[in-house]
Amino acid sequence: MTAATRHEVLTLYRRVLRIARGWRARSGLQQDTDDERRYIAHEARTLFRQNQQVSDLESIRKCIEECQARIEIGLHYQNPYPRPVHIPPMGLATQKGRRLRAQERLRKQAKPIYLKSLDDS
């Protein structure tokens, strides 16, 4: 990791934690605000630690793009939780073999950038 990307990653991490500190729930309830603040901080810590060992510059760029997308979507919709994913038609096929591999490929292509870090399980 270069010094510039390290600085960019640390800046993003600080930005997310600042957003968590100043977050207000859309409902206006203090309990919801506290829950969402905890979720934002926990999600940031978890994902940044999970990706701490990533050393490939292209992978780091993808992680940065995902983080920026999640920040913008969360601020725009005033909702810190991930938005649902549209699964293509026949996306949940149970057949084995070639069709299943094609469906898996379609599912990966349909997954938006802001959900790349979430597990498929």
Image: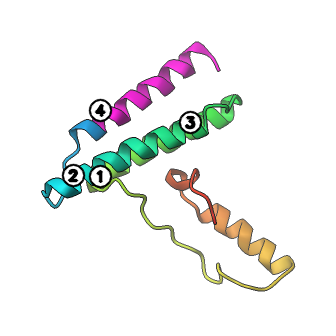
Write down the residue under mark 4.
18
Rounded to the nearest angstrom, the CA distance separating label 3 from label 1 is 20 Å
Q: Sequence order check: which comes first, mark 2 or mark 3? A: 2
Write down the residue under mark 2.
33
User: Hey, which quadrant is residue 83 in on the image?
Assistant: bottom left
User: Which quadrant, please, contains the N terminus?
Assistant: top right
Q: What SS does tag 4 mark?
A: helix
Q: Is residue 8 magenta?
A: yes
Rounded to the nearest angstrom, the CA distance separating label 2 from label 1 is 5 Å
User: Hey, which quadrant is residue 98 in on the image?
Assistant: bottom right
Q: Residue flagged by tag 4: what amino acid is it?
A: Arg
Write down the residue under mark 1.
36
Which residues lie in the magenta part? Answer: 1-19
Q: What SS does tag 1 mark?
A: helix
Position in image of residue 63 (x %, y %): 57, 39
Q: Is residue 33 left or right of residue 39?
A: left
Q: Are marks 2 and 1 in contact (CB under 8 Å)?
A: yes
Q: Are marks 2 and 3 in contact (CB under 8 Å)?
A: no
Measured along the vertical axis of the image, is residue 79 above or below residue 56? below
Q: Which mark is residue 49?
A: 3
